[in-house]
């Protein structure tokens, strides 16, 4: 049976590398006052709800959302600009943001303009 949770939602376990990319996309959209949907559904690197592992879910994120990003390790390489572009396009689309697979290619590709301004900004 599903649940509608208002207020404090579940902690969603996401691998550090993917979460760093999601953070940049999410904060860029929220800084621009753009609301969007974030969905997870058995993507590689997403364990889902920590209380109910493997569950699928959707969050509606807006400027009033309170997000906390926690990492198990420090960032030791540049973000993948190609991946950021894919995630930005997803976040701007009807289906919303989800952790799509990282495209193959140069991880240090240029950061897309839509996300560039937030790469070094404090969270």
Image (spheres, rainbow, N blue to C red):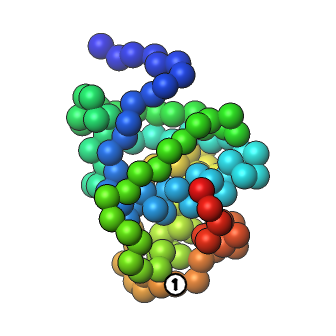
Answer with the quarter of the image where residue 95 lies. Answer: top right
Q: Could you tell me if residue 95 is visible in this image?
A: no
Describe residue 98's horizontal placement relative to residue 52 as left or right: right
- Picture coordinates of residue 77 (x, y %)? 41, 80
Q: Which quarter of the image is occupied by the C terminus?
A: bottom right
Q: Which quarter of the image is occupied by the N terminus?
A: top left
Residue 34 sits above or below residue 1 on the image: below
Answer with the quarter of the image where residue 112 lies. Answer: bottom right
Residue 24 sits above or below residue 37 on the image: below
Q: Could you tell me if residue 30 is visible in this image?
A: yes
- Picture coordinates of residue 60 (x, y %)? 58, 33
- Picture coordinates of residue 12 (x, y %)? 37, 40
Which residue is at a point 45% across and 40% down the rendered structure image? Answer: 39
Residue 46 sits above or below residue 25 on the image: above
- What residue does disc 1 label? 109
Describe residue 63's horizontal placement relative to residue 85 as left or right: right
Judging from the image, what secondary structure is the residue with disc 1 in?
Answer: loop
Describe residue 14's horizontal placement relative to residue 82 as left or right: left
Total residue callouts: 1
Q: Nearer the viewer, residue 21 or 58?
A: 21
Which residue is at a point 52% across and 84% down the rendered structure image? Answer: 109
Which residue is at a point 68% across and 48% down the rendered structure image? Answer: 30
Farthest residue, direction left: 53
Q: Determine crowd level at label 1: few under 14, some 14-19, many 20+ residues with C-alpha closer than 10 A.
A: some
Which residue is at a point 38% across and 69% down the rendered structure image? Answer: 74
- Picture coordinates of residue 42 (x, y %)? 29, 44
Farthest residue, direction top: 1
Describe residue 42's horizontal placement relative to residue 93 as left or right: left
Q: Nearer the viewer, residue 71 or 27?
A: 71
């Amino acid at each position: 049976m599903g649940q509608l949770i208002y207020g404090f939602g579940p902690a969603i376990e996401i691998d550090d590398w993917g979460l760093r990319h999601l953070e940049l996309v999410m904060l860029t959209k929220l800084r621009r006052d753009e609301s969007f949907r974030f969905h997870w559904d058995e993507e590689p690197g997403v364990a889902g709800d920590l209380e109910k592992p493997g569950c699928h879910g959707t969050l509606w994120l807006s400027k009033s959302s309170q997000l906390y990003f926690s990492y198990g390790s420090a960032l030791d390489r540049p973000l993948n600009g190609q991946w950021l572009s894919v995630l930005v396009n997803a976040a701007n689309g009807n289906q919303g943001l989800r952790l799509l697979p990282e495209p193959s290619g140069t991880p240090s590709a240029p950061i897309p303009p839509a996300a560039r301004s937030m790469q070094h900004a404090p969270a």
